[in-house]
Image (tube, rainbow, N blue to C red):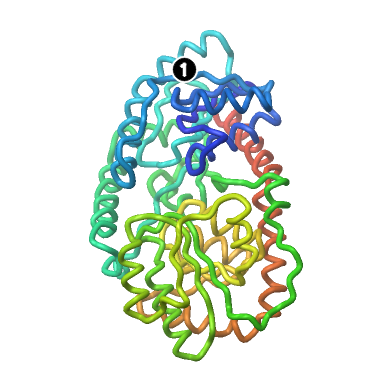
Amino acid sequence: MKVLISANACSPERGSEPKVGWDAVLAISQHHECWVLTSTKFKREIEDRLALEPLPNVHFIYHGPDYQWIGHGMTARLQSWLLYHQWQKTVLSEARRLCEEVTFDVVHHVTLTAWRMPPALWQLGIPFVWGPVGGTAEVPPQFLKQLSLVSRCFEVARKFHGALSMRSRSFKRCIRNSSVVVAANDENSKFFHRHYSEANIVTLPVVYFSASRIQELERPTRSEVDAPLRLFAGGTLQGSKGIALAIMALAKLRDRGIDFSYTVAGHGPEIGKLQRLVRQLGLSDRVHITQPFSGSAYISQLHAADVYLMPSFRETTPVTLLEAMLAGCYPVVADASAPGEIVREMGGLAVACSSVQALIDNMAQALAEISRKRSDTAVEASAIAARVAGKYSRASYAAAIDRTYKLAAVEKQ
């Protein structure tokens, strides 16, 4: 098929949304010829990579002005949303120009993945695929009080924005005119079914892993189980990740006489609060909050850890969790959002979170049991890694995209 891809964020050099866009292009172009509409901001990075690794089946079209980020954290996020909104307002005319030159079989919007900012390319009159789309999860109300003031304000503003977006004309028109909506997980699928029951909705994770990445993450054989229990967490340290509750659970583990070390690698608005909590609980010798690791140092941290511990109440596709599972870490998360879905399906512990205290107590009990059965846990973690490698491979992603395009073509007839 000839596919027009909308990937505002698309880069081989970055993580997050740009990586989602780039990886989608790589997978889709295995079986289809692709024209990719992306932001001019990523032109140099894309062209540098293509000079080394050509993609003969892909044609990039750069649209919109180049720009530099202003500030960081929340400021950068707000800026990215504004720039994306401006890009969406003008990209439709560029897409129509392309349609005069190429007869496309399907149009596929890949990034940004947020449902609150629906794309406009369904107006081209070509079978339109939207997604994978995510972002419907919310932090449960009973956990908001555990967040810092900044994080709490963000979560409240996000919920208010979501309520407005659900009622917006652009969202309603986009979902009704999408041949297929691709939900990033079951939680998002239920959300779309609830708001438009007639939509064709399939489920496909936002990310996948190449064979080389899976091999790179594979854990070397390790036999020692008598060292302190080693736990790891990584990513953006915002309130919705629930790291503070994990630290409180570890204080209970310490009180049971169980030795452990917990490395939290990342940056974000909760760092100050987490550092104060560690000192208050007397865990400074066991809990270490560091800058993010990258490359081989990051993989070494995963291979050294027994457990990946991050509750996390709202995520679309938790990449670090999946990488940790591929690296042989046993996952312990809250039974919420995508992390809970993944762990229930792949293996590990999705801990019940009916209340703040219940989650803390249940995590402490789960970690004590893991420490007692270290050998059994290691065997199970290896089996989990194999299951994740099978489901989240590039081949599985590409095959799901092929099925989706065929469904879109049928629905438009």
**Nearer to us in this view, 255 or 393:** 255
Q: Is residue 287 above or below residue 79?
A: below
User: Which residue is at a point 31% across and 36% down the rendered structure image?
Assistant: 70
Q: Position of residue 20 (x, y in %)?
A: 53, 40
Q: Is residue 107 above or below residue 165?
A: above
**Nearer to us in this view, 403 or 256:** 256
- Asked which quadrant contains residue 259, the reply is bottom right
Q: Position of residue 30 (x, y in %)?
A: 70, 31
* Location of mark 1 (residue): 95
Q: Is residue 281 left or right of residue 335?
A: left
Q: In which quadrant is the C terminus drawn?
A: top right
Q: Position of residue 383 (x, y in %)?
A: 72, 66
Q: Position of residue 220 (x, y in %)?
A: 74, 63
Q: Is residue 108 above or below residue 253?
A: above
Q: Is residue 274 above or below residue 102?
A: below
Tell me the element at label 1.
helix
**Amino acid at dot 1:** Ala
User: Which residue is at a point 71% across and 53% down the rendered structure image?
Assistant: 390
Residue furthest front in the image? 285
Tally of numbered discs: 1
Local crowd size for mark 1, using a 10 Å CA cut-off: few (<14), some (14–19), many (≥20): many
